[in-house]
């Protein structure tokens, strides 16, 4: 179905996007007028040694493209530079915090998938009925609750008042970690659940109105079979596309949730690094999130022909 | 909730001897240390952990007295030299013995510009640090300095294994490199962003401070609510510096107790521009009188504090004579809240309608209170006030960079002293001193302080210092606002800590055991 | 070949809606909040920054309808003044991103070819940077406050608008009515600017309205994280951030009032946006 | 027992709209019953209700019985059983009716596997033989293919095979050939007829094409606005329609049957301006072959010679859309272009109006070179005045936001300096010319019917007073009666103003009615040309003959029905 050529083409697109994104991340620093050293050392005592160290780390004497190549070259070898606030390699700082964020994102992702798909499907299958309305209203309101508000409420109710869940920390071992991450994942998932549910709903409603669904029904397939094999199966495309777009949002939104729940992941690290003017860390995290986004979407892109055989033939549109 | 009722609180020095050892307990900190490198340990978060792992030449006790630490004794043979005799039988956590070479290596780092030590100011007078005997280290200074030795109870006097310093290099003190010191606890694990675990060091030299807990776990929670909740629910056993909003809750929660202990910090407004209207002493006095300092204490620290007219707390007057202490605190100018009188002063000074700029930053709620209250006070006496909100980092720069203070008339600080001597405060206000932010200059004051610094006898010194305090109280180079006690929460499982700001340097965690 | 059945579907498309209560209520809420923000100094009972130590954490009283915060500042007054940055920020972002997006989308969709390819690639790259991330990056570069995030988010949201516009324009361009204009002798730029642009703008505009809610929430989140509007300026997000300190002492109002306001505005904007999309979407053959 | 017995069926939407009103239809075993009527008359609703496929929350009345079992109000399992064993349905658009994400094999076998619990291998074998039965060339290969890999005609066969997989007693066909070319339509009809005969099924055949209904049905029902207007023996109904509606429908239906009398009639009308004046054979169209009534100039209005267009597609074989095509239209003449879908008709038209640039060849209109793309505003306007176009889909060719009057006014003012009042007056004049009025000037397209829109489009084209009017399938999307109106308008304008027309259609009958001469296109090439009547009565090329033979030819004696 998918030819090797197409996959190669998509990988090429991925690399191009990554390249452009890395340019953006790297050269964004050049948007700031003035001396790069004083930018990087804002708020710190600019001892000559510190200046020399930062200048050396960034190769500030070199022409910009050379700086860029060095930077990219370092990253390809896992060297993201050194954190100014932690006096430590950025890769170490991030590496220590990544598991928490990944755990959070995976758990939230699972909730988003399960709850979002179910809610969307239920609404779609009851289109125009009370249940649909209820789900829609619920989604509209839930979707309007920013994750930081959600976090505060969840902590106040379930951690403090009821004491069912811990209000901080990420726990030890698998089960404990899951237990610790329940509330943060919910806070993170809510807004995205709403998006997925809405896409699922409209995508399924779209399919429900298709003639092929009616054909399948007319041939005596049970409603369950029709919905599973024809409605839901065909509705996956847009859901998957939107899911891909959500990945980066999930990673960024985790900064809010992590901050609220006192979790130490790369999200809270990002905020802290912005606060502490630790630009090397900011740069690295931004690049990481962008890369995750691009890679996930490339994977979805490559899966596309499996989801929709027409796309392999270039027939495209649904 | 009735906001008018001021809370009851009193100072405590002890929290009851522990019943025995405990396997482990947890402690909450509002932030993660950036580094456990003593050269950079300059903040509550760093020091409260470091104090239990790394020891200094001298030991700063909870009552702010100094006693021998890794130096079993010190001498002051000439006004310019300090000679330390290094204690025998002390080992680092890796088992290697403490030597004079380690001391020299550790202390010399403060002088190394490549390190950029935060404690350089302590060493600014130092000419050399040398091993002058098997167990002897001599520090030579350019001029007489009574203060250097006092600082050896703090981070400036921390001793680390020289071999470790060399080995770890740039990674020394961070979560990968770690530290290798002599304290009652060793650094067991540093899980970035989450917690630091300390383990009892069994070969610790000082039996009296042998750790009662096999393990202490520090968890970091930036969020005040999370901190209070964790303490209240018993998820965490204790913590320093409780959020004021939560103290009432913690007191009534029944899962532990809140204690208030010695503090050296004074909240004050630094007058950073004497060229402007505040250059006139009458305007400074008027400003202080226009401030409802009782109200500020109520709003900023929810009543856990007292208005003060001095820039030091009595707690740092450790070696003071009775006379000295009386001179220092009795009969100080009171500056009561009196807008009318203040207005009159402004009129006299002809400053009505002049403008002042106060800088603030969103660091904690007291910053907002002070900024708003100060602006309101200035307006109430006919001055124009502008609040300039800057980032916390830019705010930090106010303390280090004269350019950052350009155009700023007033800013707020909570200034704490790291050594048991009020001179630490007043030496800062001498003409030309780095931290004399407004460039205030008073010849009499300078002379008194310089004399005090050259005086070795604490009692005699205190009397000189008291003179300095009186001058500052009259002239108001900084406007003193209030003091607040150091708060600590102990859950029902633990006991034994002495509530005091000395937790920044004293191995307080070792004293905590099962209740 | 278009068949009669399809034609019937097109004819059927414009649903004539009866009055929609939630839409009207949402509109009213937004109108009230906008007016309040515009005339804040006239309406607000107190100076939003006025500290009153005698009334710290007062609950709702006759003097302070929504109570006061940790500094005794009147929450209602702060809410009214706080509506300014809270609403103005998203408004600027939505307007700027819509204008930029429509122009770029029109260019890409109408000209096609390499321009489309290049713009498409640029959009792809920007998509990889979620709005909040770009905003955070802007803060890292240019410092805290509202300006950098607003500019950054305008850029971040523009590709969404541009891609929608591009799709719409490209599909309009292939419609016979555009060919008909060409055959009549109208120039390409006339058709693009005078006919296609007005045709797609309502749909794009309605979609952009939906962005308002997201931007509002994101800017509030930024303030919540302490990277956005800085104290003591009244702003809903910053108020939630500051108000959080009181939650532990049982003083919920300072945090909950702005939080509820954020939720209400986002819901209202979404209701309006969705309704508009529905109404407008039906007007043009899809 | 009757196979299908619908009696008094009514269907109401929850909002009270009555969509079907007392429909009664019966189908006996082995019988083919036609259901005809215009778009929206309720044909599909009726057919679907037989299988219990009703609009959401619709209210029904009356009864529907399949082999004696009631459909309305049947339990879920009963309904499933009826669908699995008794009746099945073929839908209009095979592209929409087959799940694009599943293979053809999946489509054919799923019901067998999931409903009849047959093994996968068994089901595949059965599917394969079904595909063979509907004359698919390579059954086993097709099972593995996805719908997008097959043509429309093949897909419709797959749909038929799918419907037959349950061996139904009743086959419902809802416009099964409307989306297909005439030639493909003929093949599909043949397959259907064959299967019906071999299986002895009853068939309910829905179509809006009277000719088709008449050619295959035993009995027909004529529906209009949710009611049955008339019913009876197919030929009887069409030959001698009783209901006024049926009469109109029959009258509006064009035919390609050429009667001798008609040739004479046309010859008799030879002096009508704009009509070719001789019946001389014209197997090709050299200049001057058609003697033109407008004597002013003998130069043809349109000369396209050796025009070619090839579309290059990335990564795929190039499409030769038009290959070396040459046509001419005398002033005041009307040329028809017919051919299957994809034969290049539209591409040729688009090149003539300048929407597409020819790769090779030469186009002259009214003696002026119009091959290249106009570069200046003046050239653009000149080009526009020389040729205008009416597009196929009236729903898409008008700007949805612009009122009818405004659309015409824009065109007028682009080409002539007019005061607002003058322009308004002219707009009304033009609208009246196409049988619309002042009040339509204010209407937005969405509030106009298809026929009205197409007339607005014509008025807009005429506003510029072009030398040549190109109509690309301008009536294909319209119901027969509406089509008849529009064709009438065009005929009248030609008569009144001597307009030169290039008329493109896949419907031979329509071309026959409007055009003096016709060219036949196939895969980009012109294969035959000549006077329309001669071409239809004596086609020279096998392809033309196939085209003509594919058109259903009812034997109901259309001669008897007077034209217009
Ligand atoms: N699900 C539905 N909900 C509401 N109205 C419907 C529905 N299906 C059909 N209608 C309406 O019922 C009427 C009859 O529709 P139907 O599809 O039966 O017409 P038709 O005769 O098959 O037309 P065509 O030739 O265009 O297929 C139309 O006016 C249509 O708008
Ligand atoms: N823009 C284009 N790009 C690529 N191929 C095209 C394009 N336009 C038309 N074609 C191809 O050119 C061929 C002729 O198309 P054209 O539209 O002229 O056919 P047609 O005879 O008008 O068919 P129909 O009856 O379906 O309208 C077809 O194979 C079509 O797929
Ligand atoms: Mg139909
Ligand atoms: Mg065509």
Image (cartoon, grey):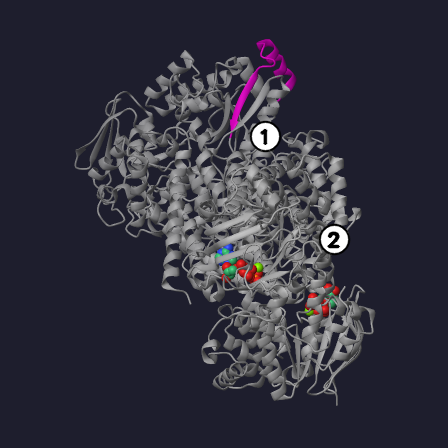
Q: Chain of mark 1?
A: B
Residue at the image position 53 percent from the left and 22 percent from the top: B357
D178 sits to left or right of A96: right
- Residue D487 % position (x, y): 70, 59
For this rendering, which residue is in front, C59 or C202?
A: C202
Is D414 one of the magenta-colored residues? no
Indicate the position of residue B508 as horizontal and vertical percent values. Answer: 40, 44
In which quadrant is the N terminus of chain B drawn? top right
The yes-or-no answer for disc 2 within 8 Å of ligand 1 is no
Magenta region includes residue B338: yes
Front of the two marks 2 and 1: 2
10 Å neighbourhood of mark 2: few (<14), some, or many (≥20)? some
Where disc 2 sits, the SS reads helix
Residue drawn where x is 67% and y is 58% of the image = C10
Q: Circle 2 marks a residue in which chain?
A: D
- Which residue, given by chain and number where applicable, does mark 2 sit on? D447
Closest to the observer: C177 or A147?
C177
- Residue B47 lies left or right of residue A167; in this view the side is left
Quarter of the render that holds ligand 3: bottom right
Residue B366 percent across, percent down from the top left: 54, 34
Expressed as whole percent of the image width and height from the top left, the position of residue C73 reads 65, 34
| Residue B235 appears in the figure | no
The answer as to whether the residues below labels 2 and 1 share one chain is no
Magenta residues span B336-360
Q: Residue at x 31, y 31 (%)?
A: A51
Q: Which residue is mark 1?
A: B296
Instruction: Work out how far the residue at label 2 is from the one at label 1, CA to CA, in angstroms.
Output: 71 Å
**For residue C209, above or below residue B423:** below
């Amino acid at each position: 179905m998918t030819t090797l050529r197409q996959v190669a083409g998509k990988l090429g697109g991925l690399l191009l996007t990554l390249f452009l994104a890395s340019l953006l991340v790297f050269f964004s620093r050049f948007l700031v007028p003035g001396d790069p050293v004083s930018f990087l050392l804002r708020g710190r005592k600019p001892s000559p040694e510190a200046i020399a160290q930062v200048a050396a780390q960034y190769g500030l004497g070199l022409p910009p493209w050379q700086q860029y190549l060095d930077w990219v070259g370092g990253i390809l070898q896992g060297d993201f530079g050194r954190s100014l606030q932690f006096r430590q390699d950025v890769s170490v700082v991030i590496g220590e915090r990544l598991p928490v964020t990944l755990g959070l994102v995976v758990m939230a992702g699972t909730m988003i998938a399960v709850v979002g798909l179910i809610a969307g499907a239920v609404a779609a299958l009851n289109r125009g009925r009370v249940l649909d309305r209820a789900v829609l209203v619920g989604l509209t309101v839930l979707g309007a609750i920013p994750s930081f508000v959600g976090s505060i409420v969840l902590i106040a109710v379930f951690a403090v008042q009821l004491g069912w869940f811990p209000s901080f920390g990420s726990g030890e071992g698998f089960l404990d970690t899951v237990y610790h991450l329940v509330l943060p994942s919910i806070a993170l998932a809510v807004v995205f659940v709403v998006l997925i549910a809405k896409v699922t709903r409209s995508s399924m409603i779209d399919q429900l109105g298709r003639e092929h669904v009616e054909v399948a029904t007319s041939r005596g397939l049970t409603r369950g079979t029709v919905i599973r094999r024809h409605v839901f199966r065909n509705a996956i495309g847009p859901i998957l596309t939107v899911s891909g777009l959500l990945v980066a949002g999930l990673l960024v939104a985790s900064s809010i949730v992590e901050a609220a729940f006192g979790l130490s992941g790369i999200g809270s690290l990002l905020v802290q690094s912005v606060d502490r003017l630790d630009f090397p860390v900011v740069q690295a995290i931004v690049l990481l999130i962008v890369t995750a986004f691009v890679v996930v979407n490339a994977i979805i892109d490559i899966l596309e022909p499996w989801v929709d055989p027409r796309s392999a033939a270039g027939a495209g549109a649904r | 909730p009735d906001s008018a009722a001021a809370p009851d609180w009193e100072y405590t020095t002890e929290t009851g001897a522990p019943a025995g050892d405990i396997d482990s307990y947890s402690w909450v900190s509002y932030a993660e240390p950036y580094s456990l490198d003593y050269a950079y340990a300059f903040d509550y978060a760093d020091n409260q952990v470091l104090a239990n792992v790394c020891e200094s030449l001298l030991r700063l006790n909870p009552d702010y007295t100094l006693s021998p630490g890794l130096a079993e004794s010190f001498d002051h043979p000439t006004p310019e030299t300090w000679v330390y005799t290094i204690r025998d039988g002390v080992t680092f956590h890796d088992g290697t013995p403490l030597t004079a070479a380690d001391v020299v290596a550790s202390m010399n780092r403060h002088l190394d510009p490549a390190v950029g030590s935060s404690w350089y100011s302590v060493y600014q007078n130092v000419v050399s640090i040398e091993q002058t005997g098997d167990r002897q280290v001599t520090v030579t200074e350019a001029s007489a300095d009574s203060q250097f030795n006092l600082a050896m109870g703090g981070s400036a006097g921390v001793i680390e294994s020289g071999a470790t310093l060399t080995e770890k290099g740039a990674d020394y003190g961070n979560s990968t490199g770690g530290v290798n010191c002599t304290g009652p606890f060793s650094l067991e694990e540093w899980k970035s962003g989450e917690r630091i675990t300390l383990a009892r060091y069994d070969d610790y030299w000082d039996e009296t401070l042998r750790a009662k807990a096999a393990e202490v776990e520090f968890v970091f929670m930036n969020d005040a609510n999370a901190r209070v909740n964790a303490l209240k629910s018993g998820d965490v056993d204790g913590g320093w510096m409780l959020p004021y909003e939560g103290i009432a809750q913690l007191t009534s929660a029944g899962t532990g107790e809140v204690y208030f202990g010695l503090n050296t910090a004074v909240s004050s407004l630094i007058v950073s521009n004497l060229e402007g209207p505040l250059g006139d002493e009458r305007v400074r006095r008027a400003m202080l009188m226009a401030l409802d300092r009782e109200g500020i204490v109520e709003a900023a620290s929810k009543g856990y504090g007292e208005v003060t007219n001095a820039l030091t707390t009595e707690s740092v007057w450790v070696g003071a004579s009775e006379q000295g202490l009386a001179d220092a605190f009795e009969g100080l100018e009171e500056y009561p809240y009196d807008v009318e009188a203040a207005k009159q002063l402004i009129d006299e000074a002809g400053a009505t309608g002049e403008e002042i700029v106060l800088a603030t930053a969103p660091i904690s709620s007291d910053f907002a209170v002070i900024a708003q209250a100060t602006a309101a006070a200035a307006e109430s006496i006919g001055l124009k006030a502008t609040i300039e909100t800057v980032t916390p980092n830019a705010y930090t720069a106010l303390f280090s960079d004269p350019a950052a203070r350009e155009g700023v008339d007033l800013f707020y600080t909570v200034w704490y002293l790291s050594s048991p001597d009020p001179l630490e405060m007043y030496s800062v206000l001498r003409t030309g001193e780095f931290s004399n932010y407004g460039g205030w200059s008073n010849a009499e004051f300078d002379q008194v302080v310089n004399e005090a610094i050259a005086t070795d006898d604490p009692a005699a010194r205190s009397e000189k210092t008291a003179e300095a305090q009186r001058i500052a109280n009259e002239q108001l180079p900084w406007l003193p606002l209030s003091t607040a006690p150091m708060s600590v929460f102990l859950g029902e499982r633990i006991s034994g800590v002495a509530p005091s700001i000395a937790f920044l340097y004293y191995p307080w965690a070792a004293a905590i055991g099962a209740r | 070949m278009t068949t009669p059945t399809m034609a019937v579907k097109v004819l059927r498309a414009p649903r004539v809606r009866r009055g929609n209560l939630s839409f009207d209520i949402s509109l009213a809420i937004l109108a009230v909040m906008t007016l309040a923000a515009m005339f804040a100094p006239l309406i607000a009972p107190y100076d939003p920054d006025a500290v009153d130590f005698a009334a710290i954490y007062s609950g709702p009283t006759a003097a302070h309808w929504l109570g006061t915060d940790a500094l005794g500042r009147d929450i209602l007054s702060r809410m009214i003044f706080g509506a300014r940055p809270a609403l103005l920020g998203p408004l600027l972002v939505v307007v700027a991103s819509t204008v930029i997006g429509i122009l770029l989308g029109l260019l890409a969709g109408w000209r096609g070819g390499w321009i489309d390819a290049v713009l498409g690639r640029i959009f792809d790259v920007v998509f990889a940077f979620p709005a909040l991330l770009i905003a955070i990056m802007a803060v890292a570069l240019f410092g805290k406050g509202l300006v950098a995030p607003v500019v950054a988010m305008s850029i971040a949201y523009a590709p969404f608008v541009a891609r929608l516009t591009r799709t719409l324009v490209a599909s309009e361009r292939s419609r016979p009515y555009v060919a008909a204009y060409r055959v009549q002798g109208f120039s390409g730029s006339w058709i693009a600017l005078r006919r296609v642009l007005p045709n797609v703008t309502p749909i794009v505009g309605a979609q952009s309205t939906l962005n308002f809610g997201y931007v509002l929430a994101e800017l509030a989140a930024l303030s919540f994280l302490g990277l956005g509007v800085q104290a003591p300026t009244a702003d809903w997000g910053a108020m939630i951030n500051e108000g959080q300190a009181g939650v532990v002492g049982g003083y919920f109002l300072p945090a909950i009032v702005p939080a509820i306001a954020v939720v209400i505005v986002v819901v209202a904007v979404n209701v309006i946006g969705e309704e508009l999309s529905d109404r407008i979407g039906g007007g043009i053959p899809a | 027992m009757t196979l299908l017995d619908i009696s008094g069926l009514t269907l109401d939407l929850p909002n009270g709209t009555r969509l079907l009103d007392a429909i009664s239809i019966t189908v006996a075993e082995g019988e083919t019953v036609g259901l005809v009527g215009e778009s929206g008359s309720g044909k599909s609703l009726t057919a679907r209700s037989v299988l219990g496929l009703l609009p959401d929350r619709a209210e029904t009345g009356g009864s529907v019985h399949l082999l004696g079992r009631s459909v309305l109000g049947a339990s879920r399992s009963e309904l499933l059983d009826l669908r699995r064993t008794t009746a099945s349905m073929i839908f209009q658009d095979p592209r929409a009716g087959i799940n694009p994400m599943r293979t053809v094999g999946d489509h054919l076998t799923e019901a067998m596997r999931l409903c009849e619990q047959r093994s996968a291998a068994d089901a595949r074998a059965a599917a394969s033989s079904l595909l063979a039965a509907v004359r698919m060339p390579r059954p086993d290969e097709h099972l593995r293919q996805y719908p997008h890999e097959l043509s429309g005609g093949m897909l419709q066969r797959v749909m038929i095979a799918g419907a037959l997989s349950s061996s139904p007693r009743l086959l419902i066909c809802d416009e099964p050939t409307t989306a297909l070319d005439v030639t493909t339509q003929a093949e599909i009809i043949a397959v259907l007829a064959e299967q019906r005969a071999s299986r002895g099924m009853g068939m309910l055949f829905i179509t809006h094409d009277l000719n088709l209904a008449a050619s295959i049905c035993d009995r027909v029902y004529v529906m209009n606005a949710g009611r049955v207007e008339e019913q009876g023996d197919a030929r009887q109904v069409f030959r001698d329609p009783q209901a006024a509606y049926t009469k109109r429908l029959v009258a509006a239906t064009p035919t390609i049957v050429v009667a001798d009398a008609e040739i004479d009639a046309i010859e008799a009308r030879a002096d009508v301006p704009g009509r070719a004046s001789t019946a001389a054979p014209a197997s090709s169209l050299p200049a001057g072959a058609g003697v033109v009534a407008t004597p002013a100039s003998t130069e043809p209005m349109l000369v396209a010679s050796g025009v070619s267009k090839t579309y290059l597609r990335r990564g795929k074989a190039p499409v030769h859309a038009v290959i070396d095509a040459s046509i001419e239209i005398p002033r005041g003449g009307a040329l028809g272009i017919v051919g299957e879908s994809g034969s290049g008709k539209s591409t040729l038209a688009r090149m003539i109006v300048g929407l597409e640039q020819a790769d090779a060849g030469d186009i002259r209109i009214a003696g002026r070179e119009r091959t290249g793309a106009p570069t200046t505003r003046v050239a653009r306007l000149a080009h526009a005045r020389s040729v205008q176009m009416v597009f196929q889909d009236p729903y898409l060719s008008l700007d949805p936001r612009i009122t009818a009057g405004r659309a015409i006014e824009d065109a007028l003012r682009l080409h002539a300096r007019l005061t607002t009042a003058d322009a308004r007056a002219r707009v009304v004049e033009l609208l009246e010319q196409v049988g619309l009025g002042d009040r339509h000037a204010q209407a937005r397209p969405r509030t106009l019917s298809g026929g009205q829109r197409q007339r607005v489009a014509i008025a807009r084209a005429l506003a510029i007073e072009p030398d040549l009017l190109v109509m690309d399938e301008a009536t294909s999307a319209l119901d027969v009666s509406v089509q008849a109106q529009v064709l009438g308008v065009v005929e009248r304008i030609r008569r009144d103003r001597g307009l030169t027309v290039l008329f493109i259609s896949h419907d031979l009958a329509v071309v026959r009615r409007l055009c003096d001469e016709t060219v036949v296109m196939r895969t980009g090439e012109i294969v035959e040309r000549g006077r329309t009547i001669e071409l239809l009565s004596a086609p020279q090329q096998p392809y033309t003959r196939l085209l003509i033979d594919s058109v259903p030819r009812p034997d109901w004696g259309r001669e008897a029905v007077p034209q217009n």
